[in-house]
Image (tube, helix red, strand yellow):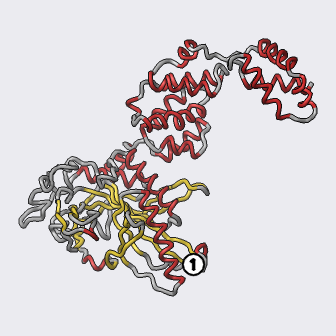
Amino acid sequence: MPFEDYEPVIGLEVHCELKTATKLFCGCPTTFGNEANTQVCPVCLGLPGTLPVMNGKAVEFAVKIGHSLNCTIASYSKMDRKNYYYPDLPKAYQVSQYDKPLNYGGYLDIVTKEGTKRIGVTRAHLEEDAGKLVHAGGKSGRLDSSDYSLADYNRGGIPLVEIVSEPDIRSSDEAHAYLTALKSILLYIDVSDCNMEEGSLRCDANVSIRKKGTEKFGTRTEIKNMNSFKFVKQAIEYEIKRQAGMLDKGERVIQESRLWDVTENKTKSMRSKEEAHDYRYFPEPDLVPIILDPDYVQKLKVELPELPGAKRARFEADFGLTPYDAGVLTSEQELGQWFEVGAKLTKNPKGFANWVMGDMTAQMKEQEKELKDLKFDQKKLAELVDIIDAGTINSKQAKEVFLELFNEGVSPAEVVKSKGMAQVSDPKAIEAAVDKVLAENPTVVADYKGGKQGVIGFLVGKVMQASQGKANPKMVNEIIKKKLDS
């Protein structure tokens, strides 16, 4: 069967570490990068006789995530023991939430090439993170090639929220858009640093395929613990092709967990996929249920900042931006705030947006600078936009002025004045120059009148040369055309 006859069905599970100062059930710090096993205590190591105490800030952050994803916030939820053995789990169980999660029934709207699409959010529940295994020896330092593994329990017990989507995603591009939008929200509400390199944001992808037009889902595989949106996209694309190839050969797709091998660019079998009953969930006996007062829940909702989706829609309406431009400018909260201040200082917010997304972003990336490092403010960039719109300088000169602005922070008006860049926009002066060029080039004029309209560029160039590049090129073109067509 042709590959195009299959439809992917994708659901994502995102694990978001919360930026609390201490762990979920004890007072150990959550600082990343400290010496292994120095941020542990009897509670997070699960030693006999210890009792956990719920971190109130973690509950607050989890509720804010629920609000931001349009979830219903449960007035009553509870913690459960998820029983399984793995070396990075010293208690041999993880404290999570099973049948009564804190947040459920939400959604997240994403922007795709076809328009806006709504992705359902099944639940966003609170749980503790596991420790970390450091795979040593071997060529790659990965599990499949390591000589041995060492356990670091510093991460064990850090609070996280697992955000589980409905299987509404139909392509790797949609998966990438969902993750990008989700990360932006988490950063806006300031509940996580979302540092994927440090493991603060990790993703599991559940992937299956089915014949287009059918309702029944195919057998899914779960690709575990990916810490890069790029890897998620690549892994999904590979897995779709792998499963399609198996079905075409009459083979059966096995429900299993797989790993994405970044060196070979392929998924590899890890273990058979567990079902809920395999974990033998039961209520955590050492913790009371989480009972939330409605006023407290509403208070947290009111405290939320304007979220990316709302800001994007407002930028489109207020500043005339395209959905794409508005999406770029609201992807980071600080960037959106910086742009909005400047957009209100000029009559051309779209032009201001183009400079922010284009030359400014390129220079920041090239020079490894952040917004706080800029030597100029929004007022000076708006000044440059207005100078361009007034026809004072052309686009080539504008780029030269911008580099002076970016590197030195000087006023664009001062640069234009000091370098004598101001364009000549006096119609009489330009007309005189045009008349002189036309008189000196009768053959070219005759060619134009004979149907060779492309020669007008030669005449424009001559006028620009005569004015040492200072004549307004748009006016030059208009005056020449008017004279030749008369």
- The residue shown at (19%, 62%) is 288
Q: Secondary structure at mark 1?
A: strand
Q: Give the quarter of the figure containing the C terminus.
A: top right
In the image shown, does 34 or 61 lie closer to the viewer? 34
In the image, 199: left or right of 371? left
Residue 320 percent coordinates (x, y): 62, 37
In the image shown, does 271 or 135 lie closer to the viewer? 135
In the image, 460: left or right of 138? right
Residue 283 appears in which quarter of the rendering?
Answer: bottom left
Q: Which residue is mark 1?
A: 211
Residue 281 percent coordinates (x, y): 25, 74
In the image, 99: left or right of 415? left
Residue 28 percent coordinates (x, y): 14, 52
The answer to whether residue 123 shows anywhere in this view is no
Residue 29 percent coordinates (x, y): 17, 49
Amino acid bearing label 1: Lys
